[in-house]
Image (cartoon, rainbow, N blue to C red):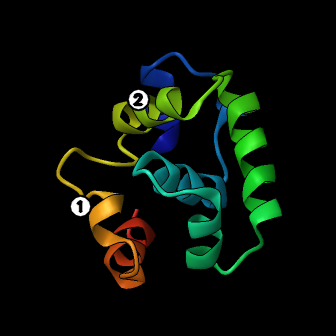
Amino acid sequence: MQTALAAQFGEPPDKQLTAREREVAAYVSLGLRNGEVAKRLRITEGTVKTHMNNIFHKLTIRDRVELALYALRVGLITVHEPSALATRGRASALSSGIAAR
């Protein structure tokens, strides 16, 4: 699916995100901080930062706002998903929705 979306939006296939990068991008796009993403994915905050650097480099974007717009455009998140602020502390609320993608 991501290959089709990448082609549709003119993004070269070599810029595709890994499954883990898509998870990180989705959580960050919903407003979670690096530490919160790390806790939900059971990885270190340093690993989240590495994924974020890779995401920014692959997509040639500079900040989380651009990442959120990208995530909306390609379907990593939708406008109907619960706000990260409303779901903080409820790890299962987001993890089930993101894992299905």
Q: Is residue 57 left or right of residue 29?
A: right
Query: Which of the labelled discs sits on residue 59, or is there none?
Result: none
x, y percent for residue 26: 47, 52
Give the answer, above or below, for where 89 lies relative to 45. Answer: below
Give the answer, above or below, for where 99 lies relative to 46. Answer: below
- Dot 1 corresponds to which residue? 82
Q: Which residue is drawn at 67% across and 52% down?
A: 18
Quarter assignment of residue 9: top left
Q: Residue at x 28, y 57 (%)?
A: 83
x, y percent for residue 95: 42, 75
Quarter assignment of residue 42: bottom right
- Dot 2 corresponds to which residue? 69
Q: In this view, does 19 lie to the left or right of 86?
A: right
> Which SS class for mark 1?
loop
> Which SS class for mark 2?
helix
Give the answer, above or below, for where 43 lies relative to 45. Answer: below
Sequence order check: which comes first, mark 1 or mark 2?
2
x, y percent for residue 19: 61, 59
Give the answer, above or below, for where 64 lies relative to 91. Answer: above
Identify the amino acid type marked 2.
Answer: Leu
Which residue is at the front of the view, 28 or 98?
28
Which residue is at the front of the view, 18 or 63?
63
Quadrant location, the C terminus: bottom left
Which residue is at the front of the view, 59 or 67?
67
Identify the amino acid type marked 1.
Answer: Pro
Q: In this view, does 40 lie to the left or right of 38?
A: left
